[in-house]
Image (spheres, rainbow, N blue to C red):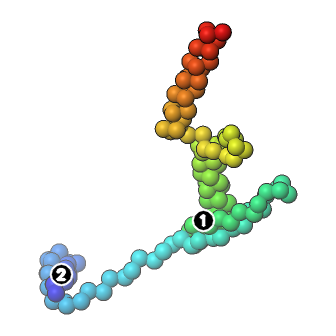
Amino acid sequence: TGQYKSLLTCRTCKYESARYEPFAFLQVPLPEDDQVSASLLLYPMQPQGEVMKYSVRVRHDGKLGDVLIALAKVLVMDQRQQEEGTAIEGKDGTEEEDKPGIDDQEEEDDEGEDEDEEDQEEEDD
C-alpha cells in the first residue's frame, strides 16, 4: 500500500495543489528489450577450416553493418584468447598450453640434476 501524489498547477495564478491517492497495487511497465540476437554462420575461406556459429546482440532497429561490427568484435576477442593460450607441441606429440606452472619448475629442477650427474660421470672417467 502507499499513496500516489498528483500535483496540479494553475496556469494563471501558478497555485499548486497536491492530491494524494491511496493505492494497493502499482502497475509499472516492464522495460522493453531494444536488442535482438542474430545467429550467424561463418564459413572460412580455406577448405580445411571449420564452419563456426556465432550469436551477437544488436539493436532491433539496427542495420547489417551493426551486425557485422558486432561479429568483428567477437572475432577479435576470440583471436586474442587464442593468442594468449598459444599451444606448443609436447614431448609425446600432443599439444600443451604454453603457460608456466608448477610442473615447469619441477622439470627445470630435474634437468639441472641430470646435468650435475653427467658432470660427475665425466670427472670419474
Image side of residue 97 versus residue 41, left or right: left
Question: How many residues crowd around disc 2 within 10 Å: few (fewer than 14), some, or many (20 or more)?
Answer: few
Residue 59 on image: x %, y %: 56, 68
Q: Secondary structure at mark 1?
A: strand
Q: What residue is at 18 percent from the left and 81 percent from the top? A: 5
**Is 10 in front, or is 28?**
28
The image quadrant where one finds the C terminus is top right
Above or below 8: residue 82: above
Closer to the chain start, of discs 1 and 2, is 2
Residue 111 on image: x %, y %: 58, 26
Most extreme residue toward the right, as rendered?
Answer: 47
Image quadrant assignment for residue 65:
bottom right
**Is 35 in front, or is 63?**
35
**Residue 5, label in figure:** 2
Q: As shown in the figure, which amino acid type bears the numbered disc 1?
A: Val
Above or below 124: residue 112: below
Above or below 120: residue 93: below
Residue 18 on image: x %, y %: 14, 81
Q: As shown in the figure, which amino acid type bears the numbered disc 2?
A: Lys
In this figure, which residue is indicated by the disc labeled 1? 56
Image quadrant assignment for residue 37:
bottom right
Look at the numbered discs 1 and 2 and tell me whether their residues touch, using CB distance below 8 Å: no
Q: Nearer the viewer, mark 1 or mark 2?
A: 1
